[in-house]
Image (spheres, helix red, strand yellow):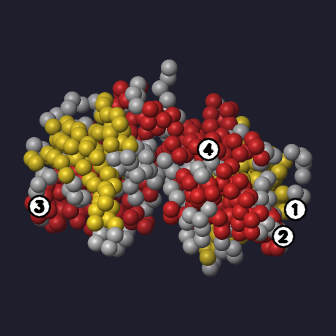
C-alpha cells in the first residue's frame, strides 16, 4: 500500500462477461483510491459500470460468467480478486459492507427484523440470544427507527420503504465496517425520506469513522455528501476530482453534459383555453372491513375532497410523496377507479356515466405510465402497440392507421422503421417515447402522465421533458402531470397541487408555489429536492 491513509486501492480494473464465444468488456482500466473516513462517489448513467465496479470489490459478480482480465483491488495488504472464498467471507459483510438499491430484495420476507440482524451478529461477532438482541436494538436506534423495541418482531412488508432502507443500513453497520458501499441507496425513496437517509449516512460516518463508496446518478445527492467524485461513462472513468472542484469547473464534456442535464426552462407559454377538466369535491375512500360479517368500521381516505379546474393547453403538476394519493386521483379522474364527487370533462359530467358510455371518451383521455416496460406488451411489436388504440376506436382504414403510426413515431423522435421491433430491444427512454406515441396517435385532448420520467437517467429525462413541451405547444395538449420529481414539475407545470395523505395542502400557479411556498410540507419537499427558494 502506498499510503497508510488509503483503505482500498483499485488499479487498472477490467471486467468482461463471457457467454460462449462472445466476450463483452464492460469495465476497462478503472483506477481509484478510497481513503479512510472519506466518501467517494461513482456517478454516471445506467449502464456506465458503476455497480459492476462496486460488486467487483466484494466479488459479487456472476462468476464464472464474469472475468477480470486485468487489475487488482488491494485492501489491508491483500488483493481481493485473488483471495480465497473463505478469507473473503470474513471480509464481506464484516469489514466491507454493502447497502443495495432495493431493500426488499436484501431482506428475507419470511424472517422478522430481529432475526435477520441477529443472524449477521451471530455470523461475524459470535453474539447470540439476549446479547445479540440488545445490540440489534442499539443499531435500530442508531439508524433512527422510532420505538425500535416494537419493531423487533416486525416483518419487512410491515415497514415503509424508508424504514426498510434504515434496517438494511443497520445490518450493514452491525459489524462496524471500515467501508460501506451504498449502491443507489435512496433511488426508490421519496425526496423527504432521501434527505433523511442521506443525513443519517453522514452522521454515521462522522460517528464511526467509516469510508463510504456511494454509487448514484443523482448529482444533487452527491454534491451534498461526497468528498471526491469519479465520473463514469461506458465502463471508463472519464474524470476524477474533489467534489467542489468538479461541480465548479468540470473538465470532461460528459461531466458537463451530466451537470447540465437538470430539466430546466419554463412551461409552454400559451394563453389558457376553455376549461378542459373540472373536479369538484372528489373522494376515493376504501372501506376497512372487520369481524365475521365484514362490517365496514372505517375508511382509508386515499383521495379526500379535491377540487380544481384545468384550462386547455395547460399543465397541472400534482406532487407529493408515495402513498399521498396522486396516482389514485389520476385514475379516479379517468374513471378507472370508483369515486364520489363531480368530474366534468370538456363541459360534460362524466362522473355518473357507465363504463360503456365512458368508453368513447377514452380516445380523448390518454395515459402514460411510470414504467414503460410494464405498460408495453412484450408480445406486440411497436407498430401494434402504437396502433392498438386506432383499431379499438376504429379510426381510419388500414393504410391510414399505418400512416398515423409512422407519424406518431416521427413525432416522438423515433425512426418509423423500428415499428417492427419489440419493446425489449429499446432503452428505457425509447420505451417511454413509444408509450407517448401510443397516447399521441389518438389525438387526445388530455394526457395523464403518471411519473413518466422517474425511471430514466437525468439526460434522458431532460429529452422527454423537452419532447412533452414541444408536443404541448404544437397540439395545444392539456397535461395532468403526476410526479415526486420537483425539477421536472417546475419545467412543465403552469399550476401545481401539493397532495398529502389524500388532501390538498397547497395549490396555485407554479411560479408562486416554487418561489414562495406557504405550507410547511411544501417547504420540506422543496428543501429535500434542494430547491429551496433564495431568501
Question: Which is nearer the eye, 469 or 485?
Answer: 485
Residue highlighted by disc 2: 87
Residue highlighted by disc 4: 198
Measured as percent of width and height from the top left, residue 277 is found at 18, 43
> Horizontally, is 431 left or right of 269 in the view?
right
Q: Residue at x 28, y 39 (%)?
A: 315
Please report whichever mark, 1 or 4, sits nearer to the chain's N-terminal start: 1
Residue highlighted by disc 3: 354
Q: CA distance from mark 3 to mark 2?
A: 67 Å
Please report whichever mark, 3 or 1, sits nearer to the chain's N-terminal start: 1
> Horizontally, is 474 left or right of 163 in the view?
left
Q: Residue furthest bottom?
A: 20
Q: CA distance from mark 4 to mark 2?
A: 32 Å
Q: CA distance from mark 4 to mark 3?
A: 48 Å
Q: Residue at x 75, y 41 (%)?
A: 206
Please report whichever mark, 4 or 2, sits nearer to the chain's N-terminal start: 2
Q: Residue at x 40, y 52 (%)?
A: 323
Labels 2 & 1 near each other (Cβ < 8 A): yes
Give the SS element for disc 4: helix
Q: Residue furthest top?
A: 535
Labels 3 & 2 near each other (Cβ < 8 A): no
Q: Residue at x 17, y 57 (%)?
A: 362
Please report whichever mark, 3 or 2, sits nearer to the chain's N-terminal start: 2
Between circles 3 and 2, the one closer to the viewer is 3
- When asked about the image quadrant of residue 317, the answer is top left
Using the rendered image of the protein, determine whether residue 521 is visible from the camera's viewpoint: yes
Residue highlighted by disc 1: 78
Measured as percent of width and height from the top left, residue 84 is found at 83, 73
Using the rendered image of the protein, determine whether residue 120 is visible from the camera's viewpoint: no
Q: Residues within 10 Å of mark 2 (few under 14, many from 20)?
A: few
Q: CA distance from mark 1 to mark 4?
A: 31 Å
Amino acid at each position: 500500500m502506498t499510503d497508510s491513509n488509503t483503505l482500498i486501492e483499485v488499479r487498472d480494473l477490467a471486467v468482461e462477461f463471457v457467454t460462449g464465444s462472445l466476450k463483452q468488456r464492460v469495465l476497462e482500466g478503472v483506477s481509484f483510491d478510497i481513503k479512510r473516513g472519506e466518501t467517494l462517489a461513482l456517478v454516471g448513467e445506467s449502464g456506465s459500470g458503476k455497480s459492476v465496479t462496486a460488486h467487483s470489490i466484494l466479488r459479487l459478480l456472476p462468476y464464472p460468467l464474469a472475468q477480470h482480465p486485468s487489475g487488482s483491488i488491494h485492501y489491508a495488504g491483500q488483493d481481493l480478486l485473488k483471495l480465497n472464498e473463505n478469507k473473503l467471507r470474513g471480509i464481506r459483510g464484516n469489514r466491507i459492507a454493502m447497502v443495495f438499491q432495493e431493500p426488499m430484495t436484501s431482506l428475507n420476507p419470511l424472517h422478522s427484523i430481529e432475526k435477520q440482524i441477529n443472524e449477521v451478529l451471530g455470523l461475524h461477532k459470535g453474539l447470540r440470544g439476549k446479547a445479540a438482541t440488545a445490540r440489534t436494538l442499539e443499531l435500530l436506534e442508531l439508524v433512527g427507527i422510532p420505538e425500535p423495541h416494537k419493531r423487533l418482531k416486525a416483518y419487512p412488508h410491515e415497514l415503509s420503504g424508508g424504514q426498510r432502507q434504515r434496517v438494511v443500513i443497520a445490518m450493514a453497520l452491525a459489524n462496524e465496517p471500515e467501508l460501506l458501499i451504498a449502491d443507489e441507496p435512496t433511488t426508490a425513496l421519496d425526496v423527504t425520506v432521501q434527505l433523511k437517509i442521506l443525513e443519517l449516512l453522514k452522521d454515521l460516518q462522522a460517528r464511526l469513522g467509516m469510508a463510504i463508496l456511494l454509487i448514484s446518478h443523482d448529482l444533487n445527492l452527491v454534491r451534498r455528501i461526497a468528498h471526491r467524485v469519479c465520473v463514469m461513462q461506458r465502463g471508463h472513468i472519464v474524470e476524477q476530482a474533489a467534489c467542489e472542484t468538479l461541480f465548479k469547473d468540470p473538465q470532461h464534456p460528459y461531466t458537463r453534459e451530466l451537470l447540465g442535464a437538470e430539466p430546466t426552462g419554463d412551461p409552454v407559454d400559451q394563453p389558457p383555453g376553455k376549461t378542459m377538466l373540472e373536479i369538484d369535491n372528489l373522494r376515493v375512500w376504501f372501506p376497512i372491513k372487520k369481524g365475521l360479517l365484514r362490517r365496514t368500521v372505517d375508511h382509508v381516505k386515499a383521495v379526500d375532497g379535491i377540487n380544481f379546474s384545468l384550462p386547455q393547453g395547460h399543465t397541472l403538476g400534482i406532487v407529493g410523496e408515495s402513498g399521498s394519493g396522486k396516482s389514485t386521483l389520476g385514475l379516479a379522474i379517468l374513471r378507472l377507479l370508483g369515486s364520489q364527487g363531480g368530474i366534468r370533462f370538456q363541459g360534460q359530467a362524466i362522473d355518473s356515466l357507465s363504463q360503456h358510455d365512458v368508453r368513447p371518451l377514452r380516445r380523448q383521455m390518454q395515459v402514460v405510465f411510470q414504467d414503460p416496460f410494464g405498460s408495453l406488451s412484450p408480445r406486440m411489436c411497436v407498430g401494434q402497440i402504437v396502433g392498438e388504440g386506432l383499431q379499438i376506436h376504429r379510426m381510419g382504414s388500414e393504410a391510414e392507421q399505418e400512416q398515423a403510426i409512422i407519424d406518431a413515431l416521427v413525432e416522438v423522435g423515433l425512426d418509423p422503421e423500428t415499428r417492427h421491433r419489440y419493446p425489449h430491444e429499446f432503452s428505457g427512454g425509447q420505451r417511454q417515447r413509444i408509450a407517448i406515441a401510443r397516447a399521441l396517435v389518438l389525438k387526445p385532448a388530455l394526457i395523464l402522465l403518471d411519473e413518466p420520467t422517474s425511471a430514466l437517467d437525468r439526460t434522458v429525462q431532460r429529452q422527454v421533458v423537452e419532447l412533452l413541451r414541444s408536443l404541448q405547444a404544437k397540439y395545444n395538449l392539456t397535461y395532468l402531470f403526476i410526479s415526486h420529481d420537483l425539477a421536472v414539475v417546475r419545467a412543465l407545470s403552469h399550476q401545481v397541487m401539493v397532495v398529502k395523505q389524500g388532501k390538498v395542502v397547497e395549490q396555485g400557479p407554479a411560479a408562486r408555489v416554487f418561489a414562495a411556498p406557504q405550507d410547511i410540507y411544501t417547504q420540506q419537499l422543496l428543501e429535500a429536492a434542494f430547491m429551496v427558494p433564495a431568501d
